[in-house]
Image (spheres, grey):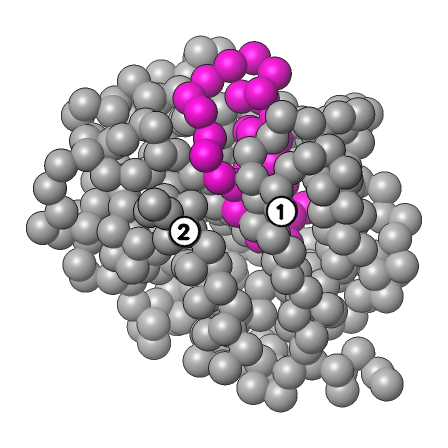
Amino acid sequence: MSIENRIDSKSNRPLKAFKKLLPKGLNGIKDIKKRREVLYENVQKMKDIHPPSPNVIRENHFTKRKEGGEDLKLRSYRPKGKEGYLPCLYYIHGGGMIMGSVENDDVNASKLSEVLGVVVISVDYRLAPEDPHPAQINDCYEGLLWIESQKEKLKINTSKIALYGQSAGGGLVIATSMMVRDVGGPKIIFQMPIYPMLDDRHETPSSHEITDIGIWDREGSIEAWKWYLGGKEADAYAAPSRASSLEGLPPAFIDVGELDLFRDENITFVQRLLQAGVATEFHIYPGAYHASENFAPDADLSKMIWNNRIQALKKAFFKA
């Protein structure tokens, strides 16, 4: 059966419309600044249909980077009417390390804050190719330390911090967890790397199989990794699949679509987590492509995907 015929029918409708406008997807736009602009425009159109939650208080924050340069931006979301110290979900956006922003993920971050009843902190890390690795992991780690330093002001219960990220954000979730394990930081009780970007080598069957869906295909992924690494060899913080040990990482929830380029590297990574003694819940969704739940939020498949994530996060934060 062809890839096209394996896509969930309701999830395929917005994908077909997107490919009519951009037959080769965003990766067909060679100028990275223009590519980011088109992504932002499409996100804004989606916001008109599925707006951010009005039931949270948003606030932008800025903190000095240790290495200097522009301040690091973070955005906090707090459910209206929620008093006292709340758990914290540290949100790391996706975009292949080359696109994305806190603004682009405003809908997901705000809704997670409302539905879970927790403070969400979203980090606006630097992007390649302007800033290659390790700029991204450095920003994510510094943002986590900032959360700990601001716990009184933001009324955050730092004994209940979990990490969430999709795609590139998922890879950075794992890298951040590894950095906390290796050099210290606030305890992470749970991590949710969603279809994480883990391996620069592109050697798996799925990385050869997914070439023309239009959402994060092989050619675009190879290009993004090239920009992200900036001509250097990948270390474990850039490509967690290269980590020699996964022991000591927090419990994990990972999901990936059957038709996602990252499918097989995610399967292998989950096996390694389990072998390392890391409690891990894993879902593979037939008919789902990369980020299909964001492209087609009204599809039954997308609703199931989000419900499973929310239930897992509630269990992590509020289990007896």
Identify residue type, mark 1: Thr
260 displayed left or right of 82:
right
- Total marks shown come to 2
Q: Name the residue beneath numbered marker 1.
A: 280
Q: Residue at x 46, y 34 (%)?
A: 189
Instruction: Find residue 239 and report its horizontal and vertical position in percent.
Output: 73, 34
Q: Residue 16: x, y in percent?
A: 62, 83
Residue 131, numbered label: none
Between 105 and 88, the residue placed more toward the observer is: 88
Q: Quadrant of residue 120?
A: top left
> In the figure, is residue 312 to the left or right of 157?
right
In this rendering, the answer to whether 76 lies above or below 49 is above
Q: Is residue 182 visible?
A: yes
Quadrant in the rendering for residue 136: top right
**Circle 2 sits in a helix, a strand or a loop, which is it?**
helix
Point out residue 86 in the picture as x, y percentages from the top left corner.
23, 39
Viewed as shown, does residue 280 lie left or right of 53?
Answer: right
Q: SS for tag 1?
A: strand
Image side of residue 311 versus residue 302, left or right: left
Rendered residue at 71%/30% (across/down): 246
Circle number at residue 315: 2
Residue for point 58% across, 20% down: 181
- The answer to whether residue 99 is seen in the rendering is no
Q: Is residue 158 above or below residue 258?
A: above
Q: Position of residue 11 (x, y in %)?
A: 58, 80
Q: Which residues are magenta?
A: 170-197
Crowding near the residue tagged with mark 1, few <14, some 14–19, many ≥20 C-alpha atoms within 10 Å: some
Of label 2 and label 1, which has the lower sequence position?
1
Spatial CA span between label 2 and label 1: 13 Å
The relative height of residue 208 versus residue 89 in the rendered view (above or below) is below
